[in-house]
């Protein structure tokens, strides 16, 4: 099992190979990796914790399915992220659409919107 913190280290190479482009897209809208973990003994499961302005989210791969945790349930349900995705590209598309939505504040849906 490998765990790394943000800063100069980055994320485990196995996770980087799989979701590096997604992480780069999230970086471009202000999210930074705080912790990540890869577990080769558990079917290659991993998670990546990201933070932005004191708010966090966790990207998870578990049993070859992708999901998100952290933001309020109502928000991820509204974004279509309240499920496990079998297809990474579908997960990426929905996640990036949510992350780039101008109605999404730093930590969730703007209270005015």
Image: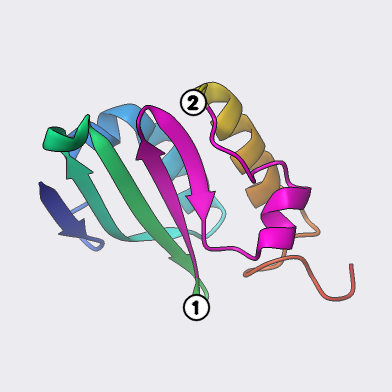
The answer to whether one can see residue 54 in this image is yes
Q: Which residue is mark 1?
A: 54
Please identify the quarter of the rendering in which residue 102 is found.
bottom right
Q: Is residue 11 visible?
A: no
For the point 37% across and 34% down, which residue is it?
Answer: 19
Q: Position of residue 33 (x, y in %)?
A: 35, 58
Residue 62 lies, in percent from the top left, at 36, 37
At a point 67% along the width and 60% down the height, the residue shown is 73
Q: Quadrant of residue 40?
A: top left
Residue 8 within the magenta-colored segment of the rendering: no
Label 1 packing within 10 angstroms: few (<14), some (14-19), many (20+): few
Task: Name the side, left or right, on which 9 lies relative to 33.
Answer: left
63 relative position to 97: left or right: left
Residue 86 rendering spot, x and y as whole percentages: 50, 24
Relative side of 4 to 21, left or right: left
The residues colored magenta run: 56-85
Asked if 60 appears above or below 30 in the picture, the reply is above
Q: Secondary structure at mark 2?
A: helix
Q: Which mark is residue 88?
A: 2
Q: Report the mark closest to the observer, 2 or 1.
A: 2
Quadrant of the snapshot with the C terminus = bottom right
Q: Between marks 2 and 1, how big is the CA–CA gap?
A: 27 Å
Asked whether 89 or 86 is in front, the reply is 86
Picture coordinates of residue 32, whole percent (x, y): 40, 60
Is 81 magenta? The answer is yes
Query: So how many labels did they put on this image?
Result: 2
């Amino acid at each position: 099992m490998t765990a790394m913190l943000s800063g100069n280290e980055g994320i485990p190479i196995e996770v980087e190979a799989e979701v590096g482009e997604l992480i780069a897209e999230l970086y471009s809208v202000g999210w930074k990796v705080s912790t990540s973990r890869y577990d080769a003994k558990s079917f290659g499961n991993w998670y990546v914790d990201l933070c932005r302005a004191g708010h966090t989210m966790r990207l998870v791969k578990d049993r070859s399915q992708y999901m998100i945790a952290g933001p309020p349930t109502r928000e991820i349900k509204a974004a279509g992220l309240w499920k496990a995705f079998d297809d990474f590209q579908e997960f990426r598309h929905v996640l990036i659409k949510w992350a780039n939505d101008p109605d999404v504040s730093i930590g969730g849906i703007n209270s005015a919107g």
